[in-house]
Image: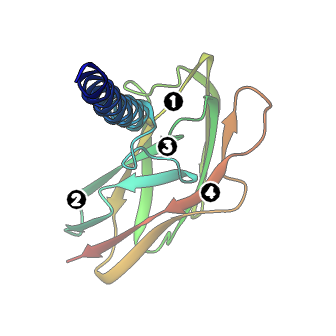
């Protein structure tokens, strides 16, 4: 009996060890799974959001569309969006129909670029270059341009012309990817 009892006791001990080993393995699997899951969640939170603007830098006009009356004033804001790229200079060249619009003035009072390099308007073209000492990123106002509305037109465009640029402040390259002008109706 003593031997039988020892055998039963030994088998029970082995089953207990196996039971503990299986539970330990399961516990280890759960701990690893939780740690990997927590790591994945933290990586997702610290990764750049898909809504972050990472496309090409752009120049654009606001409003992009507007209806104006003959004899009235049309004021357009020139803006840049360098997204996450560092910039410290912008060259905005515009073209417009001088039969429909007459250039009146530049307004740079609210420009993020406080240094004037060029402000020129002549016979359907505008050239404005602005800069700043320090770099910035994201959407910034460059200047406002005002026109006198001359003649009734179904639609007239103000577009960006060649030579426009957004300058990367770290290597002085043009990072302009696209530009969006405006279409204006005149009554």
Determine crowd level at label 4: few under 14, some 14-19, many 20+ residues with C-alpha closer than 10 A. few
- In the drawing, does residue 168 fall left or right of residue 10? right
Describe the element under mark 2 as helix, strand or loop: loop
Mark 1 or mark 4: which comes first in sequence?
1
Q: Indicate the quadrant containing the C terminus: top left, top right, bottom left or bottom right.
A: bottom left
Image mark for residue 37 = none
Q: Tell me the residue that label 3 is attached to.
A: 80
Residue occupying the point 23% across, 69% down: 70
Structural distance between the alpha carbons of marks 4 and 3: 11 Å
Q: From the viewer's perspective, is the residue at label 3 or at label 2 nearer?
A: 3
Q: Nearer the viewer, residue 175 or 161?
A: 175
Describe the element under mark 4 as helix, strand or loop: strand
Image mark for residue 72 = 2
Quarter of the rendering containing residue 13:
top left
Structural distance between the alpha carbons of marks 1 and 2: 35 Å
Please name the colour scheme applied to the rendered image.
rainbow
Mark 4 or mark 3: which comes first in sequence?
3
Describe the element under mark 3 as helix, strand or loop: strand
Image mark for residue 177 = 4
């Amino acid at each position: 009996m003593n031997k039988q009892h020892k055998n039963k006791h030994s088998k029970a001990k082995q089953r207990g060890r196996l039971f503990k080993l299986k539970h330990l393995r399961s516990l280890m699997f759960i701990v690893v799974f939780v740690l990997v899951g927590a790591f994945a969640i933290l990586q997702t939170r610290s990764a750049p959001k898909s809504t972050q603007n990472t496309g090409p830098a752009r120049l654009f006009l606001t409003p992009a569309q507007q209806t104006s009356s003959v004899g009235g004033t049309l004021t357009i804001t020139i803006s840049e969006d360098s997204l996450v790229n560092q910039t410290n200079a912008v060259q905005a060249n515009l073209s417009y129909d001088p039969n429909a619009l007459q250039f009146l003035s530049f307004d740079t009072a609210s420009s993020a670029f406080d240094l004037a390099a060029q402000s020129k308007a002549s016979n359907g073209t505008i050239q404005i270059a602005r800069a700043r000492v320090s770099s910035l990123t994201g959407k910034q106002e460059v200047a406002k341009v005002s026109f006198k509305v001359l003649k009734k037109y179904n639609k007239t465009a103000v577009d960006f012309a060649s030579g426009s640029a957004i300058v990367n402040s770290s290597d002085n390259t043009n990072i302009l990817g696209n530009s969006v002008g405006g279409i204006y109706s005149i009554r």
